[in-house]
Image (cartoon, rainbow, N blue to C red):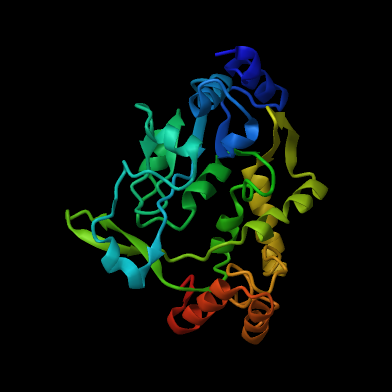
Amino acid sequence: MDEKKYITKNQLINEFLELGLKKGDILNLKISLKSIGRIQNGAETVIDALLEVVGKEGTLVTDSFIKPYPSYLRLLHTNEISTEKSLSYAGAITNTIIKRNDVYRASHPIQRFAAVGKHAKYLTENFTIKSEPYGFLKEMAMMGAKNIRIGSKDKVVGVGTTHVAICELRLQQLLIPRGVYYINDKGKKEFYYAGWANGCPNGFNNLIDLYRSKKLIISEGMVGNAEVIITSMKSTLEFEIDLFSKKPNAFLCDDPTCTFCSFTWVNSEFNISKALIESLKTKRLKTLFYFIKLLILGKYYPK
């Protein structure tokens, strides 16, 4: 392998240090590996570089979630059981961390956060099926954690706290019930329903300019070929709670055919008829069928 053509661990360490990361940092990772470029030994090198930068007193966290499916299809998924060994849909960094010998992973059926480092055991053991949705990230925010997002707006979503703010304010969204099978504390298979609202990638990322204008971004720069934004989770969470309490649709996009936004939120500016008409006009038949299913099967979350 010609090292000159690949991004090395030492290069990553230097770039992370230039961005202001330091020993003892608790980091929530939102990373598009491909955006960084060709990395020697791939995801393992990125993780090893971050661990060297934060040291033994630091902690790395990934949202290694299990993808839920519509509850009306659950009979087709009876053999798919969510466990602490289940792979996540969240990408290469997440699934590489899951396989580490020193990883701790939350027992929650869907929100199976994975963590490595000083606070990994504490954070994962205290987040269970009975915890508040995204309570793991709220706890990180209160501990002074940082969110590091590596990748452009079309590759990475949010800064790790927007879902927390939505759940804290109990904002309601119409969704088709969804969930996964897991093994309960009595050793029996059970279907777990996801009882929280969903977000729109475009809407969440539209908030980044607001974070910047409010000086909530700690640092910005590049790692390899990728854009990097580092934020204080406590600061963005406090800002979002204040913003959404005054303007509950601030995190929504402006596309009337968006299946995350549109008429699904109680506070959306759109309505059912506009969503259906725009879906027909733009020939988005899949979107149209989804809206119809939503009207027939949908329920509001949080309950």
Look at 49% across and 37% down and name the residue there. 92
**Residue found farthest to the left:** 187
Residue 30 horizontal/vertical position (percent): 58, 41
Look at 60% across and 51% down and name the residue there. 161
Q: Quadrant of the C terminus?
A: bottom left
Q: Quadrant of the N terminus?
A: top right
Residue 28 horizontal/vertical position (percent): 55, 39
Classify residue 16 by image quadrant: top right
Look at 60% across and 17% down and name the residue there. 8
Q: Is residue 68 left or right of residue 249?
A: left
| Image vertical order of residue 162 relative to residue 44, above or below | below
Residue 239 horizontal/vertical position (percent): 70, 54
Viewer-closest of 295 and 148: 295
**Residue found farthest to the right:** 213
Q: Is residue 40 left or right of residue 202?
A: left
Residue 15 horizontal/vertical position (percent): 69, 23
Q: Is residue 271 left or right of residue 136?
A: right
